[in-house]
Amino acid sequence: MVLFNGRGKSRTTPVAGTAKDAEDMRRMNKLQELNRVYTTITLAGYSVILGLTWPFSLFTVLFSLTNGRPPPARFGSSEPAAGGQYHWVAVFAPAKWRKLASYIVGWMCALGWQAAVPAPANVGGATIQAFAVVASPAYNPKPWHVVTLTIAICTLAVVFNTFCARKMPGIEGVVFALYILEFFAIFIILLVMGDRSSAREVFTVFQDNAGWGSVGTACFVGASGPVITMIGADSAVHLAEELKDASRHLPRAMMITASVNYLVGFMILLAAMFVVGNVKEVLETPTGAPWVQILLNATQDRKPVLVLMAFIIFFLLFCAINANTTSSRQLYAFARDGGLPYSEWISRVSPHKHVPANAVFLTWFIGCCIALIPLGSTEAFLNIQTIAISALLASYIVAIICRIHNRNYGSIYGNLSKPPPFFLGKIGGNVINILALMFLVCFLVAAVFPIEPHPTVQSMNWSSLALGSTLIIALVAWVVRGQKYLGPDVVVPVDDSNIVVAEPKYNKELA
């Protein structure tokens, strides 16, 4: 359908969802500005590719840990909005603190996702460089090569998210299928061709190579590396307004994502630990990528390893594309509610493509700026990625605490008058939330630890300082311009019509 704005310029209407989607959007006082083109499977594929659990399990295999996380599924069922955590906090926090808590969590989410944008692109660039080393040992890798590749991959993400947005669900489905096939290929190769250690060595031998003086502390601190795979846990939520029948299918997509990530991540981690061999030799590999050396040791042949690496590079490209998608959607949603400077400009949606183009390009710009940091300090870049993890973990923790409080001292259904499609009951919800809270607090503490017991300025983990600074900045911003933060309007009467009655937060001009 083609509509006309007040100046006679045409615009198309976004692809609609179901009547339930329209009802949810009216209840949450949100306009349907984005195309609802995703299904359960394609959104699950999107989230799995963004998480890339089994490749990142290989990248961080020497830390001996990988994780996924399903708890947000219950939130997505009752409040399927692109804002995610800050929106849930606005719904479930005590009334007195809702607006402030939502504002701070929104800043945490924005910090976390924007800082994480260049991470998969950087890993993709480093993997391309490792590919070149394996293909041609004469190649001399330079840091600026990875930086250039990182920016190129970030730019590719903008192209896909601007011009191919409506086709992305189908593309995600194909990439997801290839991703699973590649997993089985590497899993079988490691088990069949690699020299296996005994189960006793794998499960009972622990080492404190960093010199912490305690194996337990070493294992705890080691969790800070692979915990990066957790940042994809809420990725599907930020596409809630692009999923058909979101309140029903969003939780399913998130549970499928968590189940797949748990299974394949654990399997590939276990296989790699059995064939890792000499840890020192693997760490000192000329490729700069220990996981590549593990594959080379298993196959004793560069050609199959190059093929496997090519597929992983392909997946990392789409991981970077999806990172831009999720980050830009979170930024768009928070700006739509007035949470950022220049919110009206950031939240503007293309009237023809129905993509938050300004948020997409701003996300690209921020990502490219962060991507330049390794030219001066690789440690600083890694610290920024740790900051991303810490900020997102903090947002998860606050959202879960608010939900526990609301369930026990407010309404068991949140703002709904009846159970949402995905509902565990009061006892089941409390048990899952409390376990998740304990898990997340432990990993947040691990995420802010330095990687060695006596760190230098360069090797220190500055994420705790950055997280505290972000909190201070958010509080100052709240004092200065907090009155401009509209917050998610979540209690809106809903009638039986299919007419969208919500008004836009800003008087956006249609270009």
Image (cartoon, rainbow, N blue to C red):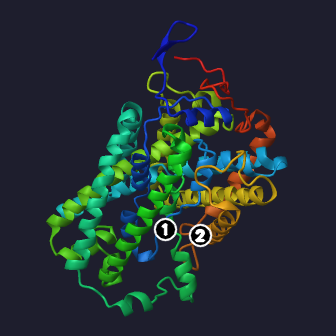
Number of residues whose C-alpha sits closer than 10 Å to that of mark 2, classed few (under 14), some (14–19) or many (20 or more): many
Please give the count of numbered marks on the rendered protein.
2
Residue named by callout 2: 443
Front residue of 465 and 277: 277
Name the residue at 63% across, 47% down: 78
Q: Is residue 505 above or below residue 363?
A: above
Q: Is residue 97 above or below residue 497?
A: below
- Answer with left or right where residue 336 lies relative to residue 145: right
In the image, what residue type sits under mark 1? Asn
Name the residue at 61% across, 63% down: 462
Q: Are marks 1 and 2 in contact (CB under 8 Å)?
A: yes
Residue named by callout 1: 67
| Quarter residue 139 falls in | bottom left
Q: Is residue 229 above or below residue 188?
A: above
Name the residue at 49% across, 86% down: 208
Name the residue at 37% across, 39% down: 168
Rendering coords of residue 358 (x, y %): 52, 31
Specify the farthest residue to the right.
96
In the image, what residue type sits under mark 2? Phe
Front residue of 359 and 252: 252
Front residue of 255 and 117: 255
Task: Tell me how far mark 1 sits from mark 2, CA to CA.
Answer: 11 Å
Front residue of 488 and 27: 27
